[in-house]
Structure formats: structure tokens, C-alpha cells
Image (cartoon, rainbow, N blue to C red):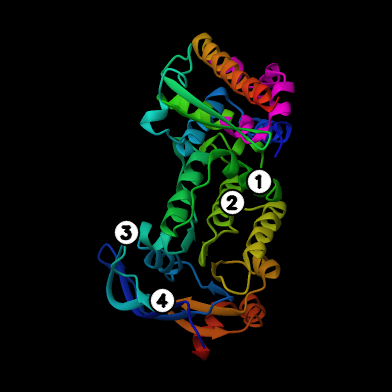
Amino acid sequence: MTIEETLQKYKEDFDLFMTPNEKMEYIFDLGKKHTTLPEEEKNDDTFIVGCASPAWLVGECKDGKLILRGEGTSEMAKGMLTLLLDIFSDKEVDEVLAFDPQRLGELGIVELLSPVRQQSLEAFIKKVYAYAQQCKENEK
Amino acid sequence: MSKVLEIKDIHAKIGEKEILKGLNLDLEPGKVHAIMGPNGAGKSTLSKTIVGHYDVEVTEGEILYKGKSILDMEPEERALEGIFLSFQHPVEIPGVNNAYFLRTALNAKRKHEGKEELNAAEFLREMKKYLEMLGMKADMISRSLNEGFSGGEKKRNEILQMLILEPDVIILDEIDSGLDIDALRAVSEGINLMKDGKRSFLVITHYSRILDYIKPDYIHVLKDGRIIKTAGPELVAQLEEHGYESIVEEA
């Protein structure tokens, strides 16, 4: 699936819920499929600076695609990471770089996040773009 | 002939009163069995006995489900194994969201069957599909279980549970009581949708109208705690015309 398709899939999912609480619960629900990172990969390089709770993101380039793996510590972070990794990982690097992060607003959940969490989201996206940029430069 | 449920010489009482007095009944896979009988014959007690309701004490006899005795099993174990009862009078449970209730029940069953649990979105997709089919309003998702539901809504909600849980033996205790024609049709369509040649139905009713929709294979007449006659659907016409007294004379 492309970023666009994955985003649409989640938009449809979130549209199913009528109340903000239900949407938030769905995020927690997604967190049940949250994966972890081996200890040695949790370091200063992978630490997401600016996240409300400690979180790490590993980015690798493979055949023109950006592969992401991450780990969050709070329930919220686990859910959001699962969602965001699904959207951004295993995608064409060019697609990641061309994607306007404002469009995550279409999910109808960003406004439900506290200001601190919104900052975390920004910090995450920044790191994703940094990894994608790296992949692009390595290609040259 | 294979049987999915075998009820053998069941004696059961509620309180001190013996209601089922040596009842025998076999359900065949893929068949619709209708139970008809006068008031107080033991129809609801029969359904309660099969699911293990705490009101009922079985004093004698045996019930085998898929060849295994279920009398020592808790009601929830029987449900997990695939036995479903739609209540004659569904209870209202304020504070318990309908969708939560159903998803929890479904995921318990899926877990029991070794399947992956459905997340909230996956579940709601399923639920919405059936809501539409049953002509139920979308707010049924977030309302409390049966609280303030009309009679028709409660019965449709029972059918919704049945559709989602996909049981193997379906007991419908007067699912048609208090339903208007539209609700009866919607409920019947839900039931017909579940017919897959394997599931068995036990339809307890007073009226022949629902049987016009869901076409039973067998009619059993229950009177005074025992099945006194079993015949094909043609028996309905006789009952309508001559009443239960005519059957007693034959038996």
C-alpha cells in the first residue's frame, strides 16, 4: 500500500467512531500490535528528541524504500507509533519526502492530542524525514 | 442420522416445581426445529435448560452437544462452544455500551477458537453491515445495551448478536413476540441469513406467522413438560385449526 492508501484506510477506520473517546481507544487498540526494539538500538541516535515519553525510531533504506522500526513507552505512544509506522514504513523514499505531513490532520485525531503530544508527533515526523533525506543522499 | 444436540429424558425443575418431565428431543445439523405448545408447557424452561440458566435444576437425564455432555458446563462455556439463546425478554444493562458488549463477547469466542481478536474498527465494520441489514439505527452502536430500546429493537439486537457471534446451535425463545410486520421480516431475514446447511435452529413460538418466513423442517409439540408429537411443517395448519387439544388426543 502507498502512504495515500494507508492514510485513507485509517481515515475510514477513524470515521467509524462517533466520539473522541472511541477514536482514542482505537489508537490504544492499535498499540496492542506495537513492536519493540532490541536494547542496543535504543540509543542517542534513534531517540526521538521532543517526544513526551521516551521513544526511539530506527530508519533504514532498502531498494529505494524507507524501512522504519520504533518503540514507544507510553500507551499513547505505542498506539501512535503503530499507526504512524504503518503509514510511513516500507514506502518509497520519494513518496515519504513528497508527503505533506499536514495531511495527517485528515485522520481527525491530531486535534484530539494534547499540545505536548502534538509536539511529539512533529518530532516523530521530523525524524522520519531526516531518515528519508539520508536515504536520498546515500543514493547519490 | 447425525445430531448436533441430543436431549435425553430430561427432568428439570424451577424452584420445587418440576417443569420438564422426561423430555426427549434431537436437533439435526442444518435443520430448523420449531417448538410449539400451550402456555406453561415448559418451552422457556427447555431453552433455559439447554443454556444452563441458574433458575433451572436438572434432576435427571442428559444433554449431549456434538456428542459431549454439557450439563456440568457453565453457561458461558456453552456459549463459547457455540450455543446461543436469544432471550424472550432481553435484559437492559445501563452503562454497558452495546458495541463494547458485543465486541467483548465476540473476541472471547474468537480467542476460544484460537482466532485473532478483532480491533474496534474491524468490529464496527462488521456491526454496521448487519445494523443496516436489520434496519437498525446507527446509534445502536453507542447506546447502552437494550436500555430504552423498544420491543422490536431489543429483538433485532438479539438477532444482531446472533449474526455476529455465528453460533452453531441457535435457540430463539419467542423471538417473534411483540414484533410488528417489518420487524418480524427483518428478524426472519437475519435468521435465514444464518442458515448454512450446518447450523441448527430451535424456534420457540406461539404463532405460525414467523414459520411462514423461516420454514421449519420439524414441528415439535411440547405439552406438560414433554414432546408429545413431532411432524413436518404441515402440522402447523392442524394446530392453527384444531388447537393443541387435538394433538393430545392423538398422542
Residue toward you, B185 or A56: A56
User: Do residues under tags 4 and 1 come within 8 Å of each other at their CB atoms?
Assistant: no
Q: Nearer the viewer, mark 1 or mark 3?
A: 1
Q: In the displayed structure, does residue A121 sit left or right of residue A54? A: right
Cα separation between marks 4 and 3:
18 Å
Labels 4, 3: one chain: yes
Cα separation between marks 1 and 3:
32 Å
Residue toward you, B115 or B227: B115
Quick one: label 3 or label 2, which is nearer the N terminus? 3
Up/down of B148 relative to B103, above or below: above
Look at mark 3 in the image and give the residue it sits on: B55
Q: Residues within 10 Å of mark 3 (few under 14, many from 20)?
A: few
Q: Chain of mark 2?
A: B
Look at mark 2 in the image and give the residue it sits on: B160
Q: In the displayed structure, does residue B112 sit left or right of residue A84? A: left
Residue at point 62% right, 84% down? B232
Q: Nearer the viewer, mark 4 or mark 2?
A: 2
Identify residue type, mark 2.
Leu
Residue B131 badge: 1
Quick one: label 2 or label 1, which is nearer the N terminus? 1
Q: Chain of mark 1?
A: B
Quick one: label 4 or label 2, which is nearer the N terminus? 2
Cα separation between marks 4 and 1:
39 Å
The segment highlighted magenta reads A85-113
Q: Secondary structure at mark 4?
A: loop
Cα separation between marks 4 and 2:
32 Å
Q: Nearer the viewer, mark 4 or mark 3?
A: 3
Look at mark 4 in the image and give the residue it sits on: B224
Q: Quadrant of the N terminus of chain A?
A: top right
